[in-house]
Image (cartoon, rainbow, N blue to C red):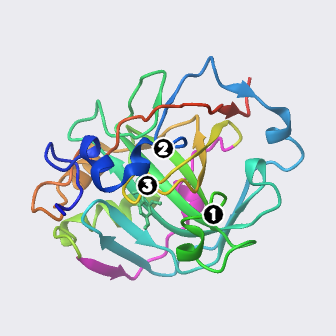
Amino acid sequence: MAHWGYMTTNGPSTWGKDFPIANGERQSPIDIVTTAAEYDSDVLGSNALSTNYTPESEVKLVNNGHSIMCQITKKGVLTGGPLGKDEYRLEQFHLHWGAEDNRGSEHTVDGKMYASELHLVHWNASKYSSFADAVQKPDGLAVLGIFITPGVACNQFKVISDNCGKLKTSGAEMTVDTTLDPTLLLPSNTSDYWTYLGSLTTPPLFESVTWIVFKEPVEYSKEQLLALRNLVDSDGNHMQDNYRPPAALKQRKVKKTFT
Ligand SMILES: COc1ccc([C@H]2OC(=S)NC2=O)c(OC)c1
Ligand SMILES: [Zn+2]
């Protein structure tokens, strides 16, 4: 089986061959049609979305061949909003981006693509014993999607962008002796978001993700975006355009917490 990727020969339009769920009922990403999203007060309700992350004392970075990932070791909890009382544990974060600023995000908003999209990945620790156990369950994962737009540098992201040069090959790993507070990767407004039931956006495309996509983008500098584009993927090409285009919404509704 040719390994999946983002090239013409092994990209998103070919994934259905080896992963038939690619044409499933709750695939991600999607185009968020803002006028069709439904304001849902009980999503907003008494249990507002809340994060309680512990800063990492060292930063474990991995080039996994498809993205750059930061493996989380401290206890970080996401709960509330569409997650109700369940506590979801922060497992890792990674990104998707384009070769140029006009593309790169996975979710789109009324057809608009951002330059990149940061995914903070959590698993339901109230119901399952590990990420691996939760990854295939319909309520197993919660992913925070944060849009990235070119602008001022994001200080908390510096530890990643400053070290991309040392992670140029697929499988490369490194531990940086510095702290990182995942809370500081979030937009200032974490009350306004869209939420819907979806999936992983790369194979195995499991339909196990409650998506929470923040309305407010975060700014990264041009240099920080360039650092991502200089990474090398598992085929030895520049890791760029590692985003899946939007999938069909099918019978789903997107909810929003703002009017
Ligand atoms: C086995 O673990 C995985 C596999 C794939 C993904 C993809 O799904 C989303 S979302 N982004 C991705 O790159 C993942 O992310 C949570 C975790
Ligand atoms: Zn992702």
x and y percent of residue 44 in the render? 81, 39
**Amino acid of disc 2:** Gly
Horizontal relation, residue 238 to residue 122: left or right? left
Sequence order check: which comes first, mark 2 or mark 3? Answer: 2
Horizontal relation, residue 84 to residue 249: left or right? right
Where residue 111 is drawn, which disc sits there?
A: none
Q: Mark 3: which secondary structure?
A: loop
Q: Mark 1: which secondary structure?
A: loop
> Where does label 2 land, which residue?
24
Sequence order check: which comes first, mark 1 or mark 2? Answer: 2
From this viewpoint, which residue is outermost toward the top?
Answer: 35
Q: Nearer the viewer, mark 2 or mark 3?
A: 2
* Disc 1 residue crowd, few under 14, some 14–19, many 20+, Cα 10 Å: many
Which residue range is magenta in the image? 172-190
Task: Judge whether residue 241 is colored magenta.
Answer: no
Q: In which quarter of the image is residue 168?
A: bottom left
Q: Nearer the viewer, mark 1 or mark 2?
A: 2
Where residue 140 is drawn, which disc sits there?
A: 1
